[in-house]
Image (cartoon, coloured by chain):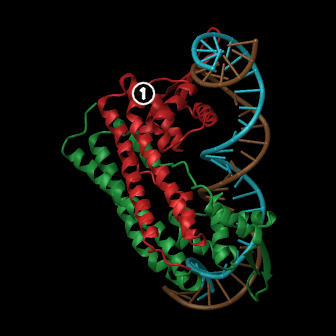
Chain colours: A red, B green, C cyan, D brown
Amino acid sequence: MSLDFAILGFLSYHPSTGYDLKKMFDVSVRHFWPADQSQIYRTLARLTEQGYVEMEKVAQEDRPDRKVYHITQPGLAALVNWLGGPPAMDEPRSAPLVQVFFAGKLSDEEVLAKFEGFAAMMRAILAQYDQVPAQIGPYQQEVASPREHFFWMLTLENGIANMRANLAWAESVIERIKNGQVPQA
Amino acid sequence: MSLDFAILGFLSYHPSTGYDLKKMFDVSVRHFWPADQSQIYRTLARLTEQGYVEMEKVAQEDRPDRKVYHITQPGLAALVNWLGGPPAMDEPRSAPLVQVFFAGKLSDEEVLAKFEGFAAMMRAILAQYDQVPAQIGPYQQEVASPREHFFWMLTLENGIANMRANLAWAESVIERIKNGQVPQA
DNA sequence: CTCCTATATATGTTATATCCTATATTGTAT
DNA sequence: ATACAATATAGGATATAACATATATAGGAG
């Protein structure tokens, strides 16, 4: 469902092709809503059926025709309705936490390696976040007002805040393992 | 995939029925890996085909037979292999952040209401977390060593740390809205 | 006396998502 | 000379999940 609205959101900035949308996804919302290329095309087809978007073929020499999608009035209404509606709730799914939950099965050495792996992953993600502003820079000028940009940056702030909390947690666990504060079986 | 290992993990404590598993899920890992009842039964069927679990029918008077599943040697090996393997990575999906990303379409009043909704949700989740230790208490005695209990509590710690970071973020946004620090269109 | 909850399992349908592959052409790098 | 990346779209297969419903019985609340 959120994919539908994310696509409508991007189309509300300006008309785009599936290919364009994929690129925009990959530099912006991918960090909290990754989208497969084939999924974008299929969703575009469905949104067309629902009357939320319309398509115009733009012929090109040499390359396949571009199918440029634009949002319709009902589409814009649906988008604003969802945005202004109740806060979206989602069931969190975290495979890493499942590993932690049952990590008592492992030895202290294995657990230490696991948490050091987590910490490394989290640092890598924080490093990726650092590059986001530069990546969305081009789109910012082309597409967004300062107001829109502000909200884009809020999602980044949220990602950073969460990842820092996760890293601090992982580091505290590493400390406890090293200090022998983990109960033995 | 994680559901498979979560089920194997619980069965590694002691044999259980699908019904038992559902109850254990709902008081423990639900906060980071919710599982549908029908999904548990289907996964149990698949794990049986794979030879990771085996089932024994226990006849009961008056009620349907219990199908008690226990983990096999290959199942335990697969579990430990996954736990000790590379850190599980998962693509995060956050519908609320999609709403934030496109929230520039809304008025300041609507945005304020939205973030106050978020903050209320987060406080409710933190309140739920407070009750988790009491909920898993019974299982703790019956099933887990202090070592296992330690790792259970680590997942709770992680949830609390993340949710506090989220709440601080939401509150800081609310402040900025109230102080007129949000750029206008 | 009726309704709800608990115990216990299972299927059908739909939605969603992932992965792989196919098609077609141009430009760039090795 | 050849391979790879970019532009552009799309379908098949598979996996996962969500939601509703079905079966069957006992016990307690109102």
- As drawn, B98 above or below C30: below
Query: Observer-nearest residue: B152 or B168?
Result: B152
- As drawn, D11 above or below C6: above
Q: Which residue is mark 1?
A: A13
Q: Amino acid at mark 1?
A: Tyr
Query: Observer-nearest residue: A142 or A5?
Result: A142
- Left or right of residue B40: residue C28: left
Residue at 37%, 37% (x, y): give it. A152
Q: Name the quadrant of the C terminus of chain B.
A: top left
Residue at 54%, 85% (x, y): give it. B141
- As drawn, D2 above or below B53: above
Percent of width and height locating residue B168: 30, 55
Percent of width and height locating residue B172: 26, 50
Residue B3, image quadrant = bottom right
Percent of width and height locating residue B49: 81, 64
Residue D10, image quadrant = top right
Q: Chain of mark 1?
A: A
Q: Residue furthest top?
A: A61
Label 1 secondary element: helix
- Left or right of residue A15: residue A103: right
Q: Name the quadrant of the N terminus of chain B.
A: bottom right
- Left or right of residue A59: residue B163: left
